[in-house]
C-alpha cells in the first residue's frame, strides 16, 4: 500500500517539537513533510524578555523533510525576535505545495493565525483531512462571557474544516469540549519533551553534583529549591521568593537554598529582596541554554513553577525527567496531568502566598518523602512522551483516513 502522505504546518521550527517530527518522518507507512512560515529560530536572535542573544543548541530541522514557505510580509532584520501575530508570518505557495505533495492529511499547530485559516480552506478544497493541535485551555487566557460566546461561534465555523483535534492534556481536551467538539474527534497527543535526553543528561550531571554545589557554595545536605523561567511578572518569581522568606529559617526545613535560573527585568528587584535574607540563602544562576539545564535540574530537590498563567509549562516535564518533586500553581496547564499532590509534589492556589509557603513546608520537611516524590515524578513522566504522541497521531490519522494506516 502507498504510504499515507502527511503535511505539517507550523509558524516556525520549535525545539520541543523537533524530535517528534523526526519520529514521524521515521514511520515506515507515513511520508512526512513539515512546512514553516519562518525559520528565524534556526539562527541567532535576541529575545526581548531575556535581553540577550538566543542560539538553540539542539538540532531543529535535521532528520525530516522540511520547507520554509515564501513570505508575503516583510522579513524582520536578521538577529531580531520575529513577532508572531494574527497576520505574521504571512506566507504564499502553500496551496501549490499541497497540490504537488498529493497529501492525504494536514496537521496544523495552532488555529489563531490567518495562515492557519487559509491552510484549512486550501486543504478542504482538495479533500485533504485536517488535524489541529493547540495549547489553549479554559485557564490559558481571561475570557469574558462575550469572548467565550464569540469563540464558540468561531468554532462552529472552524469545525466544518477540521476533522480531528489533538489534545495536549486534560485541560486542553476540556477546552475542545467547551467549544462543542465531540470526544470522538479528540485524540491524546500529550505535550512532551525529549524524555530520554533530559534523563540521560541529568544522570550524567549527577556525577558532578557535589562539585557543582561546592562551586555555588551550597553545603552538603542543604535542600535546593529551583525556579527555572524568565524573571518576569507572569512567572511570579517574587511570589516564590516571598514564600521562601517565610519558611527558610525554620529548622525543620533543613536550611534550604533557593536557586533562580533565568533572566529578565525583575532580576534586580529579586536580588535586592534576596539580600535581606542573608548572603547564603539565594543563588542567581542566570540564563542557561538547553544543554545547560539538566545539571540545574539535577541540582535541585524540588522544582517550583508559581506562574500566574501558563498554557502548559514544559519545564515541568523536563525537571520530572530528572526525578524531582514539583510544586505548581493551579494556573499551570500541566499541573492536573503531571502533578499528583502528596505523591510527587503539590499544587497551590495561584497568587496565594500562604498556600505556597504551606506547600513548600510540607514538601521540604520530609527528606525521605522528598526523594520518593522524585521517583514518582520519573515514573509519571515515563508515560508522557513522544511515544504517546506518535500513537495519538497514528490513531487520529487512522480515524480520518480509514484503511490507509493502522493505529
Image (tube, rainbow, N blue to C red):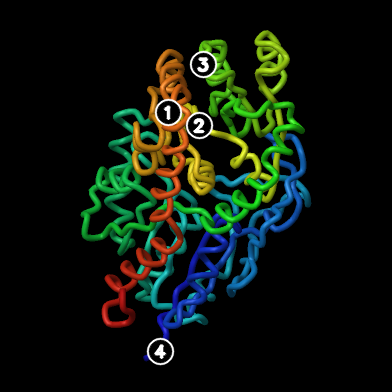
Q: Quadrant of the C terminus?
A: bottom left
Residue under numbered circle 4: 2
Q: Earlier in the sequence, mark 3 or mark 1?
A: 3
226 or 167, which is in the foreground? 226
Residue 258 coordinates in the image, percent (x, y): 61, 24
Camera-near label (3 vs 1) is 3
Tell whether label 2 touches label 1 (CB within 8 Å).
yes
Q: CA distance from mark 3 to mark 2?
A: 13 Å
Q: Quadrant of residue 183?
A: bottom left
What residue is drawn where x is 65% and y is 10%? 277
Left or right: 91 as drawn, with respect to 3: right
Marking on residue 329:
1
Real-space Cα separation, disc 2 to disc 4, in angstroms: 46 Å
Of the image marks 3 and 2, the number of the one nearer the N terminus: 3
Q: Position of residue 23 (x, y in %)?
A: 50, 70
Quarter of the image with the N terminus in it: bottom left
SS type, badge 1: strand
Label 1: how many residues lie within 10 Å, few (<14), some (14-19) or many (20+)? many
Give the Cα separation between the discs numbered 4 and 1: 48 Å
Picture coordinates of residue 208, whole percent (x, y): 70, 44
Residue 400 relative to residue 274: left or right: left
Q: Earlier in the sequence, mark 3 or mark 4?
A: 4
Q: Which residue is mark 3?
A: 243
The answer to which of 297 and 207 lies nearer the viewer is 207
Sequence-wise first label, 4 or 1: 4
Residue 126 place in picture, x, y as percent? 39, 76
Q: Label 2 belongs to which residue?
A: 305
Of helix, strand and loop, which one carries label 3?
helix
80 or 265, which is in the foreground? Answer: 265
On screen, 194 above or below 264? below
Q: CA distance from mark 3 to mark 1?
A: 13 Å
N-term-proximal mark, 1 vs 2 = 2
Amino acid at each position: 500500500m502507498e504510504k499515507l502522505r502527511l503535511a505539517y504546518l507550523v509558524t516556525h521550527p520549535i525545539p520541543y517539537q523537533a524530535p517528534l517530527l523526526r519520529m514521524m518522518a521515521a514511520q515506515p507507512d507515513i511520508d512526512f513533510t513539515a512546512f514553516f512560515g519562518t525559520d528565524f529560530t534556526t539562527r541567532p536572535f535576541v529575545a526581548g524578555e531575556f535581553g540577550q542573544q538566543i542560539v538553540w543548541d539542539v538540532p531543529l530541522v535535521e532528520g525530516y523533510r522540511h520547507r520554509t514557505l515564501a513570505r508575503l510580509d516583510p522579513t524582520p532584520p536578521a538577529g531580531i525576535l520575529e513577532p508572531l501575530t494574527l497576520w505574521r508570518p504571512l506566507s504564499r505557495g502553500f496551496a501549490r505545495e499541497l497540490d504537488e505533495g498529493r497529501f492525504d492529511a494536514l496537521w496544523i499547530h495552532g488555529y489563531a493565525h490567518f495562515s492557519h485559516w487559509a491552510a484549512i480552506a486550501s486543504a478542504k478544497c482538495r479533500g485533504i483531512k485536517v488535524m489541529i493541535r493547540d495549547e489553549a485551555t479554559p485557564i490559558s487566557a481571561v475570557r469574558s462571557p462575550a469572548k467565550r460566546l464569540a469563540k464558540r461561534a468561531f468554532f462552529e465555523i472552524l469545525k466544518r474544516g477540521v476533522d480531528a483535534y489533538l489534545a495536549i492534556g486534560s485541560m486542553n481536551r476540556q477546552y475542545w469540549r467547551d467549544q462543542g467538539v465531540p470526544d470522538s474527534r479528540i485524540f491524546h497527543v500529550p505535550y512532551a519533551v525529549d524524555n530520554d535526553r533530559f534523563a540521560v543528561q541529568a544522570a550524567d550531571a549527577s556525577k558532578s553534583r557535589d562539585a557543582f554545589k561546592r562551586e555555588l557554595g551550597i553545603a552538603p545536605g542543604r535542600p535546593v529549591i529551583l525556579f527555572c523561567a524568565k524573571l518576569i511578572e507572569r512567572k511570579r518569581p517574587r511570589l516564590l521568593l516571598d514564600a521562601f522568606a517565610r519558611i527558610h529559617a525554620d529548622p525543620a526545613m533543613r536550611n534550604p537554598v533557593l536557586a533562580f535560573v533565568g533572566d529578565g527585568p525583575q532580576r534586580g528587584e529579586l536580588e535586592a529582596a534576596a539580600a535581606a535574607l542573608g548572603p547564603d540563602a539565594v543563588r542567581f544562576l542566570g540564563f542557561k541554554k538547553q544543554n545547560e539545564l539538566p545539571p540545574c535540574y539535577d541540582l535541585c530537590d524540588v522544582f517550583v513553577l508559581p506562574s500566574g498563567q501558563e498554557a502548559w509549562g514544559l519545564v515541568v516535564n523536563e525537571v520530572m525527567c530528572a526525578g524531582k518533586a514539583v510544586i505548581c500553581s493551579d494556573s499551570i496547564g500541566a499541573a492536573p496531568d503531571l502533578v499528583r499532590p502528596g505523591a510527587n509534589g503539590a499544587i497551590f492556589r495561584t497568587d496565594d502566598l500562604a498556600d505556597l509557603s504551606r506547600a513548600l513546608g510540607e514538601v521540604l520537611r520530609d527528606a525521605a518523602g522528598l526523594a520518593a516524590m522524585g521517583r514518582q515524578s520519573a515514573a509519571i513522566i515515563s508515560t508522557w512522551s513522544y511515544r504517546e504522541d506518535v500513537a495519538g497521531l497514528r490513531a487520529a490519522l487512522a480515524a480520518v483516513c480509514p484503511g490507509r494506516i493502522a493505529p
